[in-house]
Image: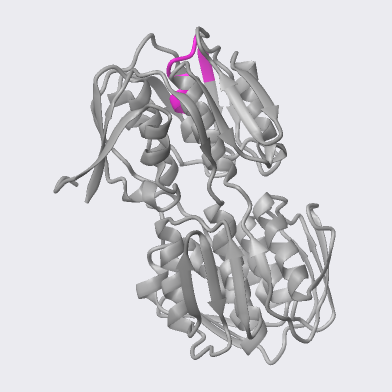
Amino acid sequence: MDKFVIEGGHELSGRVKISGAKNSALVLMPATLLNNGLNSFTNIPEVNDIFTMIKLLKHLGVDASFDSNVLKLDTSNIISQHAPYEHVKKMRASVYVLGPLLAKYGYSKVSMPGGCAWGPRPINLHLEAMEKLGADIVLDGGDIIAKSKRLHGASINFEISSVGATGNTVMAAVLAKGESKIQNAAMEPEITNLCEFLIDMGARIEGVGTSTLLIDGVDELSSAKGEVIGDRIEAGTLLIAGALTKSKIAIEYSNIDQIDVVLSKLKDSGAKISNNNGLIEIDSRDIHPKSIDVTTAIHPGFPTDMQAQWIAYMALANGTATVADNIYTDRFSHVPELIRLGANIERVNNMAIVRGVEKLKGAKVMSTDLRASASLVLGGLAAEGTTEVLRIYHLDRGYEKIEDKLTKLGAKIKRVSTNEF
């Protein structure tokens, strides 16, 4: 098991390129189960969640090759529609195989998904949508078993906007007989990326990028080539790294509209930000950040996946900030670890009250989930002395070679093997 050892207090400088979005790749990959052929993707990040999904797809019969951020998936010889616990337990996104297998083969058996150690994220919206599309679903021994001779179009209105449920439902509906209407659909960029890839495969989808999707089911889909969008969460995380360390850095990231709300909050805090043809520069030198309140919301609101990083930033701001999470109300396991670094944070229900302090001091802290890990790395970069971040396997699930990128920017961070838990 590895840990990061960070020598904090160093100013950063330079530029780095943002990797592909793992959250986008993880829904695009199962979408290939809807066709029989060779599919390829560029800009796939080399992170553990991607390798986990590849293993699952290989179990189903997909022939996969992955090299230099290019992934090829041949779905010509699917041998199973069963996603067993040994694969699914590692990652909640494994449930994305449910819709494609059901739509293509009329049957899917998927173990109840696992993943991060924080909070319940039920999949009832996925299952209710499949039933409306005509599937018979039973839960048996921890497995979801879905059957249907052929799915049929339906009108589906999600009570809660859900990226996972929207993605699964869209993939099922594109091969359903007739028309489907999905209301309160998630508008996150990952869903847009999926819809565009499905259209390239031959799907008929209208309303892409909006909360209402109209889908006219087709009999079959063909293989296609896709490109994974840039990772907006990695982009936001690295920009906060620059702001928190009072540095001037730049990131290569072309989808600036996808992080507008994060950029706006950074500007409100006092950071200077400019964009020049996909090169976003943040300059926080000689700037003491102001405390800025944040409330997470569905896209295009402030992302829940940036909540932990924002709390780390506000820990050194001037004043008091409230950071509320309305998406995942119990996602605050990073708070006690940031307090170990000297942060002054009070947890009240789904809100963190962050009172800025003059300095943080290095300590040994423990990661509990992917974004919590990122917040601890950020805290360590700004803290005086040495910070050890344990259990960084959580971080490896979603950030591609983050220590290399931070080192390129001048951070003093190294990966060390350890027996500590």
Q: Quadrant of residue 179?
A: bottom right
* Residue found at x 59% / y 57%: 24
Which one is nearer the viewer's eye here, 195 or 12?
A: 12
Q: Is residue 350 visible?
A: no
| Residue 84 placement, left or right of 320 | left
| Residue 30 placement, left or right of 357 | right
The residue stretch that appears in magenta: 311-321
Percent coordinates x, y for residue 129 in the rendering? 68, 70
Percent coordinates x, y for residue 271 in the rendering? 59, 16
Q: Is residue 18 above or below residue 98?
A: above
Which one is nearer the viewer's eye here, 128 or 165?
A: 165
Percent coordinates x, y for residue 303 in the rendering? 60, 39
Indicate yes or no whether the magenta region holds residue 131.
Answer: no
Q: Is residue 380 above or below residue 303?
A: above
* Residue found at x 76% / y 81%: 176
Indicate yes or no whether the magenta region holds residue 313.
Answer: yes
